[in-house]
Amino acid sequence: MSADTVRFSDDRLAEIAELVKRYPGPQSALMPVLYMAQEDFGYISMDAQKMIADVLGLRLMQVREVVTFYTMFKEQPTGKYLLEVCTNAGCMLNGAYELADHMCESLGIKMGGTTADGLFTIAEVECAGACGGAPVVQVNNIYHEKATAESMDALITQIRADGGEA
Amino acid sequence: MTISSDPKQVTQICFDRINIPNQNKLSVARENGAYELLPTVLEEFDSAKIIGEVKTSGLRGRGGAGFPTGLKWSFVPRNTGKPTYLLCNADEGEPGTFKDRDIMRFDPHLLIEGMIMAGFALDVRDAYIYIRGEFLHEANVLNEAIAEAYAANLLGENILGSGYSMNLTVHRGAGAYVCGEETALIESLEGKPGRPRFKPPFPAVEGFYRCPTVVNNVETLATIPAILKFGGEWHASIGIPNNTGCKIFSVSGHVNKPGNYEVPMGTSLKTLIEEYCGGLQHGSVPKVIIPGGSSTPWLTGEHYDTPLTYDDLMKAGSFLGSGAIIVMDETADLVALTHRLTHFYAHESCGQCTPCREGTGWLERVMGRVENGKGCAADVTVLKDASEHMAGRTICALAEGAAAPVLSLLKYFPEDVQTRLAENAE
Ligand SMILES: NC(=O)C1=CN([C@@H]2O[C@H](COP(=O)(O)OP(=O)(O)OC[C@H]3O[C@@H](n4cnc5c(N)ncnc54)[C@H](O)[C@@H]3O)[C@@H](O)[C@H]2O)C=CC1
Ligand SMILES: Cc1cc2nc3c(=O)[nH]c(=O)nc-3n(C[C@H](O)[C@H](O)[C@H](O)COP(=O)(O)O)c2cc1C
Ligand code: SF4
Ligand code: FES
């Protein structure tokens, strides 16, 4: 995609114009706008970053340093389903590493990898702020608490059976 | 609300309505007392009265540092010609902490009402909730609740005809633990990487866009409606002097019923774990208790009777922190756990202070080789030296928090490390 083809829709641009008014300065709208780009384009390419810099009147560097500082902004495409396994203290004490190993095996990929069909990416993440439900797995930002090998296998099977439309 | 006006009868404040279904809907929240007192506050109270009640209440910041809320509000300079901002810290990233999430997803109107009252007291026109990026569901719940509040003229222009106007915006973080530190949060809300600023100046004087800014935790702000309803004296009579009110504890790890429990301050660790959390998964006395989130020094079984107050936990050698209690029984592999925590801090250090950037990296590497069979006796000295050089020499408290687990492991369980090293030597 070139910078000319990565464009927000007119509705998005109108939404951004409204958003900017909520803050004392336009730069504050950067993170919400990056989320919009990620939602619309799947990930935040360099062209998208240039386009966002133009839209908000920022220098490309100002956009780049934010994209690279925060782990939830993705510069590369990930699988359609992002499985994020928390392995921090509370989850670790309740079997998160065993669960993570099991999920990698079920998917046939290593931690951090993406399946060949582009359906799943698995990643290890820091405390998800839900330790009462340890171990916790987020699937595209939906929390699955007290996750088990069985419940995760069932989810993976379901998504595959639905042809990735679960 | 079913909270008793008799402080001796009070067992919960923020969680009073937490189990009512659909409490996130304005109509349901209103049936249960939400916004009941707001018209009176906006009509009959003034800034001095509200700040006075909050001071009298003894409420201390629930985000971790325990700074008196009323005092912080009183530091905000007036008539500077600049706007004052109110920021709710909903970044909730400290491993073990998951209490603010429940307030936001189950009773968002309690937080919104607290913010309107705080905003009115501080003459705030624009307020923001900075919520961690992973809490997408909670952000959506808040946005729906805020939209309903705007439609009912509880937010926006001329709230309930009082002449006071306030806007409230939810702003999502994007996966950086350090952004929970209030000055990093401010940088992030300004659209920059979340790198903490030097304090002082404190945000109360110079914060968001260099204007006076109050940053308060979700639980702190959610306590305000009850304080204004029943009075500062009432709140000051709950709990223990200097440690007043109730506190939500997020309990995780090796307990049978992990979860959030709100109890009056002064309840003992043992009572909380045995009576509320169904006791331990194995054995009867915990091996390790991390009382205030992963950044706080560890306690052990000998501290099991400690009352949960800021003062008592400090006397025991730790902190109440965010109220995140991580419990470990004898099955825990403390070397592996400490290694995992050092990895967390190394990953989350923003990198601007050398002792933190280098120190967190060292701790992770050395703990890694101790865990993985490559350690040597000298590593104990390296760990100790590196940890001791991190505290007090950095811009924010992350570095100190990073050193806490390592120092605790070496202090209480040197034999666990020695055993691992001996296995390695074989
Ligand atoms: N809830 C969570 O997820 C986490 C909580 N924490 C907690 O954070 C704590 C450290 O927080 P800090 O903000 O570094 O503590 P701090 O002691 O610097 O500040 C506490 C609060 O009091 C205010 N304050 C202090 N002195 C002031 C003065 N003279 N004038 C005006 N305001 C003043 C500060 O602005 C801040 O809002 C740790 O104790 C830790 O427990 C740490 C990590 C995560
Ligand atoms: C590394 C670090 C992370 C922090 N994360 C949070 C957080 O997630 N939530 C929070 O309320 N306070 C957090 N704090 C504490 C805030 O800096 C600040 O003290 C707090 O928001 C003030 O609100 P309170 O007075 O109501 O507690 C953190 C502090 C540090 C040093
Ligand atoms: S102590 Fe660490 S996290 Fe805090 S400002 Fe310094 S480098 Fe950044
Ligand atoms: S440790 Fe996994 S959610 Fe907190």
Image: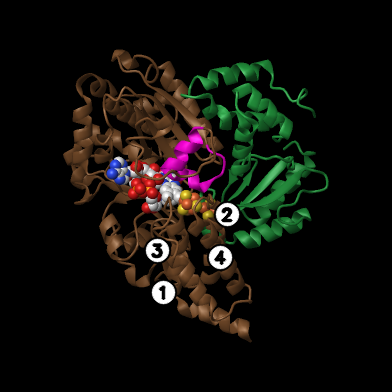
Chain colours: A green, B brown
Q: Chain of mark 2?
A: B
In the image, which is nearer the foreground, mark 3 or mark 2? 2
B362 up-or-down from B200: above or below: below
Q: Chain of mark 4?
A: B
- Disc 1 to disc 4, how far (Cα)? 21 Å
Q: Specify which label sits upstream in the sequence, 3 or 4.
A: 3
Q: Which mark is residue B362?
A: 4
**Inter-mark Cα distance, 3 to 2:** 20 Å
Q: Position of residue B117 (x, y in %)?
A: 30, 28
Sequence-earlier tag: 2 or 4? 2
For badge 3, the amino acid type reads: Pro
Q: Does residue B47 appear left or right of residue B298 in this picture?
A: left
* Residue B30 on image: x %, y %: 35, 25
Specify the segment rendered in magenta: B173-190
By secondary structure, the bulk of the magenta-drawn segment is best described as helix
Nearest to N terminus: mark 3 or mark 2:
3
